[in-house]
Amino acid sequence: NGIHLKYSILNEVFIHYDNLKNIDFYTKEIDKNGTIKHFSPFGKLTGNNIKIELKNEQTTIGFYGIKQKINSIVLYVDNPTEFIKQIEYNVKLRY
């Protein structure tokens, strides 16, 4: 029904496929005060190669229950092509 993203015990979010607006490759740096947030609590130190845009705002749950509202996040995955392909495949199966 969705994507469960975890960054160890430091950050976690479940995104329903219905809430996905767009998922794409993204390697640009992001503005620290902008609307796009790093999923990693270490920010730009971990890099990014994927951007996930949401239709509706969601909340991530971080270390000690710290919550952060997101509309768009960037993250780094080892195999971004396969990650995007699998998500697109699962979204198409639902419709």
Image (spheres, helix red, strand yellow):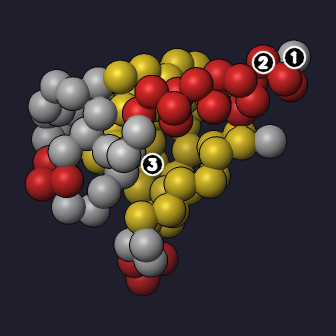
Horizontal relation, residue 37 to residue 86: left or right: left
Q: Secondary structure at mark 1?
A: loop
Q: Residue 21 placed where, x, y %?
A: 58, 20
Seen in the picture, residue 44 relative to 71 is either above or below; the reply is: below
Please give the name of the residue rendered at 64% of the width and 45% of the height, measured from the top-left corner. Answer: 3
**Cα separation between marks 2 and 3:** 27 Å
Does residue 90 appear to the left or right of 26 in the view shown?
Answer: right
Q: Give the mark count.
A: 3
Q: CA distance from mark 1 to mark 3?
A: 28 Å
**Which residue was labeled with disc 3?**
69
Which residue carries the number 1 mark? Answer: 95
- The front one of 24 and 14 is 24
In what element is the residue under mark 3? strand
Q: Do labels 1 and 3 touch, CB within 8 Å?
A: no
* Quarter placement of the N terminus: top right
Among the two numbered marks 2 and 3 on one chain, the one whose residue lies closer to the N terminus: 3
Above or below for 71 versus 40: above
Residue annotated with mark 2: 92
* Image spot of residue 86 (x, y percent): 63, 31
Q: Secondary structure at mark 2?
A: helix
Residue 66 at x, y = what percent? 41, 71
Q: Badges 2 and 1: C-beta atoms under 8 Å apart?
A: yes
Residue at image position (17%, 39%) is 33
- Density class for disc 3 (Cα within 10 Å; few <14, some 14-19, many ≥20) is few
User: x, y (%) of residue 48?
Assistant: 25, 39
Question: If you read the primary sequence from the N terminus, does the residue marked by circle 1 or circle 3 appear first?
Answer: 3
Q: Nearer the viewer, residue 26 or 14?
A: 26
User: Which residue is rendered at x = 27% and y = 62% of the image?
Assistant: 41
Label 1 Cα crowd, 10 Å radius (few <14 / some 14-19 / many 20+): few
What is the quadrant of residue 45 in the picture? Answer: bottom left
